[in-house]
Amino acid sequence: KRILIDLKTGRPTAHVAVQLAAYKIAWEEMHTNAGRINECWSVWIDGEGQYHRETCDRPGAEATFLSALSIHRWKETSK
């Protein structure tokens, strides 16, 4: 099982799922023979020193990232 872990300085917000989807896409494109990532996690420490983990595999996160990337590329070529 392959897990992508992103260490955060505070409790992650909803947009982190899109960020991790971007990391997942990039990693899988750069490591085509290594297998796919099965899960994405955010890990952070609260003010009392306790570790927390949140699974960030939200439906549509990859599609949302790819849509945002398409808009960015369109804006860059439309200047």
Image (tube, rainbow, N blue to C red):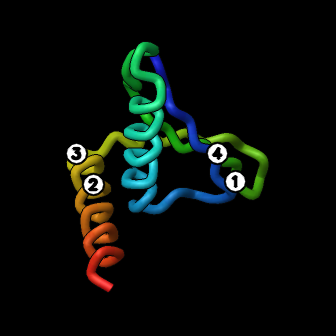
Q: Specify the label residue 7 is tagged with.
A: 4
Which residue occupies 22% across, 51% down?
63
- What's the CA distance linking mark 2 and mark 1? 32 Å
Q: Which residue is mark 1?
A: 46
Mark 2 and mark 4 lie on one chain; the one further toward the N terminus is 4
Circles 3, 4 touching at the beta carbon (< 8 Å): no
Task: Judge the density around disc 4: few (<14), some (14-19), many (≥20) Cα neighbours within 10 Å.
Answer: few
Q: Which residue is mark 3?
A: 59
- What's the CA distance linking mark 3 and mark 2? 13 Å
Task: Judge the density around disc 3: few (<14), some (14-19), many (≥20) Cα neighbours within 10 Å.
Answer: few
- What's the CA distance linking mark 4 and mark 1? 12 Å
Q: Comparing marks 2 and 1, which lies closer to the viewer?
A: 2
Q: Is residue 10 left or right of residue 34?
A: right
Q: Is residue 45 above or below residue 78?
A: above
The image quarter containing residue 77 is: bottom left
Callout 3: SS: loop
- What's the CA distance linking mark 3 and mark 4? 21 Å
Callout 4: SS: strand
Mark 3 and mark 2 lie on one chain; the one further toward the N terminus is 3
Which residue occupies 26% across, 72% down?
74
Q: Position of residue 64 (x, y in %)?
A: 25, 57
The image quarter containing residue 14 is: bottom left
Which residue occupies 46% across, 15% down?
34
Callout 2: SS: helix
Q: Comparing marks 4 and 1, which lies closer to the viewer?
A: 4
Mark 4 and mark 1 lie on one chain; the one further toward the N terminus is 4
As rendered, which of 70 and 77 lies closer to the eye?
A: 77
Q: Comparing marks 1 and 3, which lies closer to the viewer?
A: 3
Q: Is residue 59 above or below residue 76?
A: above
